[in-house]
Each structure stands twice: as C-alpha cells, then as structure tokens.
Amino acid sequence: MNAIDLLEADHERVKAILTQLSESTERGIKKRTELLAKLEMEITIHTQIEEEILYPAFKAAGAKEQDVMYYEAKEEHRTVDSLVLPDLKQTDPSTPEFSGRVKVVKELLEHHIEEEETEMFPQARKLLGKAKLEELGLQMEAMKAEYKKTMNHGMAA
C-alpha cells in the first residue's frame, strides 16, 4: 500500500465524518457523540502515522522549503489535537455552540488536508519515490493496526 494513497483514504474518511457532523442537528445528541468519538480516533491515529512515518521521511529528503512545510503541518495538527478537538469534546452536543465549533474544526481540517494533498503529497511522491512510499505504507498499516488495538482496548477497559 502506497503511503500517500493510504493517507488520502484516511482524509476521505475524516471528511465524510466531518460532513455528517456538520449536517447533524442539536437533537441528534447520540449521533453527534458517536461521530465525535469516531473523528477523534481517526484523527489521532492518522496524525500519529503522519508524524512518525511520512513527515520525518519528507523532511529528511527535502530542503528548507520542505522544512517549513513540515513545521506548518505539525503546527496545524497541534492546533487540532491540543486545542480544537478537546474544546469540542467538552461542548454540549445539544447546543448551537457545538455546531459552531464543528464548523471551525471542519474548516481547519479541510484546509490542512488540501495543503497536504496539493503541496506536500505531490512533493513527497517526487522526493521519496515509489519504492520508499510502498515501504512507508507498510509501516503505516502496521502502526495503524497497533494503535487501533491499543485504543479499542483502552475504550473497553
């Protein structure tokens, strides 16, 4: 599995969840809570595999321009993981505030995804080449499976 294809499939899943969340209503408390948990799991695992596998390889293969892109992408992850998602999780899903926050999360993530897919990923394909991306893809699949196991285990406990 090519690393970029794998990450882009993740992006599609994240975008689909965001769309469902933004279309949900204040009455759909259970639905919102479930979608939010799903979103958090997808984003947490996705961020980890990007930051531990793709980003370092991209930075190592690139020059100053790639360095800047690397830090910008990491910063966007940090904004979502440390600020925006925790806030959303603490917001009552039956309120208009929740709807407003979902909109912001959606805009941030869509911007981040678009930058990765139009700037970073095409450069990564060039810089890293097919064989390396296949190898990274295998690492990602293994890491993903591992995280899912740990996270599901944690949720069951």
Image: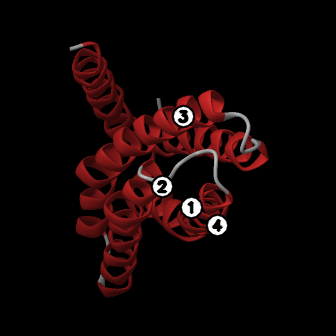
- As measured in the structure, the alpha-carbon distance from the residue carrying label 1 to the one carrying label 4 is 6 Å
Q: Find disc 4 in the rendering and name its residue.
A: 107
Considering depth in this image, is 98 or 85 the residue closer to the camera? 98
Which numbered disc, 4 or 2, marks the residue that appears first in the sequence? 2
Residue located 44% across and 63% down the image: 84
Q: SS class of the residue under badge 1?
A: helix
- Classify 157 as above or below 136: above
Which numbered disc, 3 or 2, marks the residue that appears first in the sequence? 3
Do the CB atoms of the residues marked 1 and 4 lie less than 8 Å apart? yes
Residue located 42% across and 62% down the image: 80
Mark 1 residue type: Val
Q: Position of residue 156 (x, y in %)?
A: 28, 13
- Classify 122 as above or below 50: below
Give residue 105's mark: 1
Q: Position of residue 128 (x, y in %)?
A: 38, 56
Mark 3 residue type: Thr
How many numbered circles are shown? 4
Q: Residues within 10 Å of mark 4 (few under 14, many from 20)?
A: few
Disc nearest the viewer among 2 and 1: 2
Disc nearest the viewer among 1 and 3: 3
- As measured in the structure, the alpha-carbon distance from the residue carrying label 3 to the one carrying label 2 is 10 Å
Do the CB atoms of the residues marked 3 and 2 lie less than 8 Å apart? no
| Occupied quadrant, residue 119 | bottom right
Do the CB atoms of the residues marked 4 and 2 lie less than 8 Å apart? no
Which numbered disc, 2 or 1, marks the residue that appears first in the sequence? 2
